[in-house]
Image (cartoon, grey):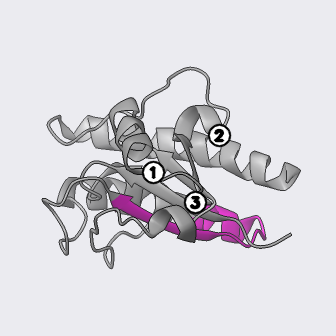
Amino acid sequence: MSTPRILFVCLGNICRSPLVESVARKRCAEAGLSVALASCGTGDWHVGKGADPRMRAAARAAGFDLESHRARQLQAADFDRHDWLLAMDSDNLTELNRLARPGAAGQAALFLPWAGVTSVQDFPDPYYGEAEGFRQCVDLAERGVAGLIERLRQC
C-alpha cells in the first residue's frame, strides 16, 4: 500500500488544521506509521502567516510545535495530491465539495466523524474565543488523531 496522503482543512489555516497536522505528525511518527500530512485553509486572509499565537501557546504547552507553520490556501491541485481532504467543519466541507472537480483523486470528509469521533461533528473554531477554547482544541485534536491512527492501521 502506498503512503496515505492527508490534508487537514480549516478556514484560515492558523488554528485548527495546523494543530491537527502537528498532532498527527507527532502521533503517527510515534506509532510508526508512514503518512504524508499537510494543512491548508479555504480562505486567503492569513496566507504566509504563522499559526495564531494563542494556538501556538496551547500546542506548545501540550508538546506540539507550530512555530515553523506558515498558512497556505487550498489549491485545485490539492485534490490530486492528497487521498483525503479532511475538513474541520461543515462549512469547509461544503467549500471542498464545491471546489472539487469530477475525477479528482482526493475525497473530502469531515475530520472528526471520519476519525471515529462521534460526540461532535464540527471541530469548533477557537479564533474568537478565550484561551480555554484553544486548550480544548488540543484535547479534541488528540482524540481525533487517535481515531485517525486506528483507521490508518486498518488500511
Q: Earlier in the sequence, mark 2 or mark 3?
A: 3
Q: Return the residue nearer the eye: 81 or 87.
A: 81
Q: In this rendering, would 150 be left or right of 74?
A: right
Q: Earlier in the sequence, mark 1 or mark 3?
A: 3
- Residue at image mark 3: 24
Q: Give the Cα distance between marks 2 and 3.
A: 12 Å
**Magenta span contains residue 31:** yes
User: Residue 144, percent across and down?
Assistant: 58, 42
Q: Residue at x 34, y 42 (%)?
A: 95
Magenta extent = 25-40
Instruction: Mark 2: give few (<14), some (14-19) or many (20+) Cα within 10 Å.
Output: many
Instruction: Mark 2 vs mark 3: give the one in front.
Output: 2
Q: Residue at x 19, y 60 (%)?
A: 53
Where, quadrant-wise, is the C terminus in this rendering? Answer: bottom right
Q: Decide: marks 1, 2 in contact (CB < 8 A)?
A: no
Instruction: Mark 1 vs mark 3: give the one in front.
Output: 1
Q: In this rendering, would 31 be left or right of 27?
A: right
Q: Residue at x 22, y 70 (%)?
A: 50
Work out whether residue 36 can be spotted: yes
- Picture layout, residue 128 above or below residue 73: above
The dot on residue 100 is 1
Instruction: Mark 1 vs mark 2: give the one in front.
Output: 1
Q: What amino acid type is highlighted by mark number 2?
A: Ala
Q: In this rendering, would 140 be left or right of 90?
A: right
**Magenta span contains residue 33:** yes
The dot on residue 115 is 2
The dot on residue 40 is none
- Picture layout, residue 116 above or below residue 86: above
Q: Decide: marks 2, 3 in contact (CB < 8 A)?
A: no
| SS under mark 2 | loop
Q: What amino acid type is highlighted by mark number 1?
A: Ala
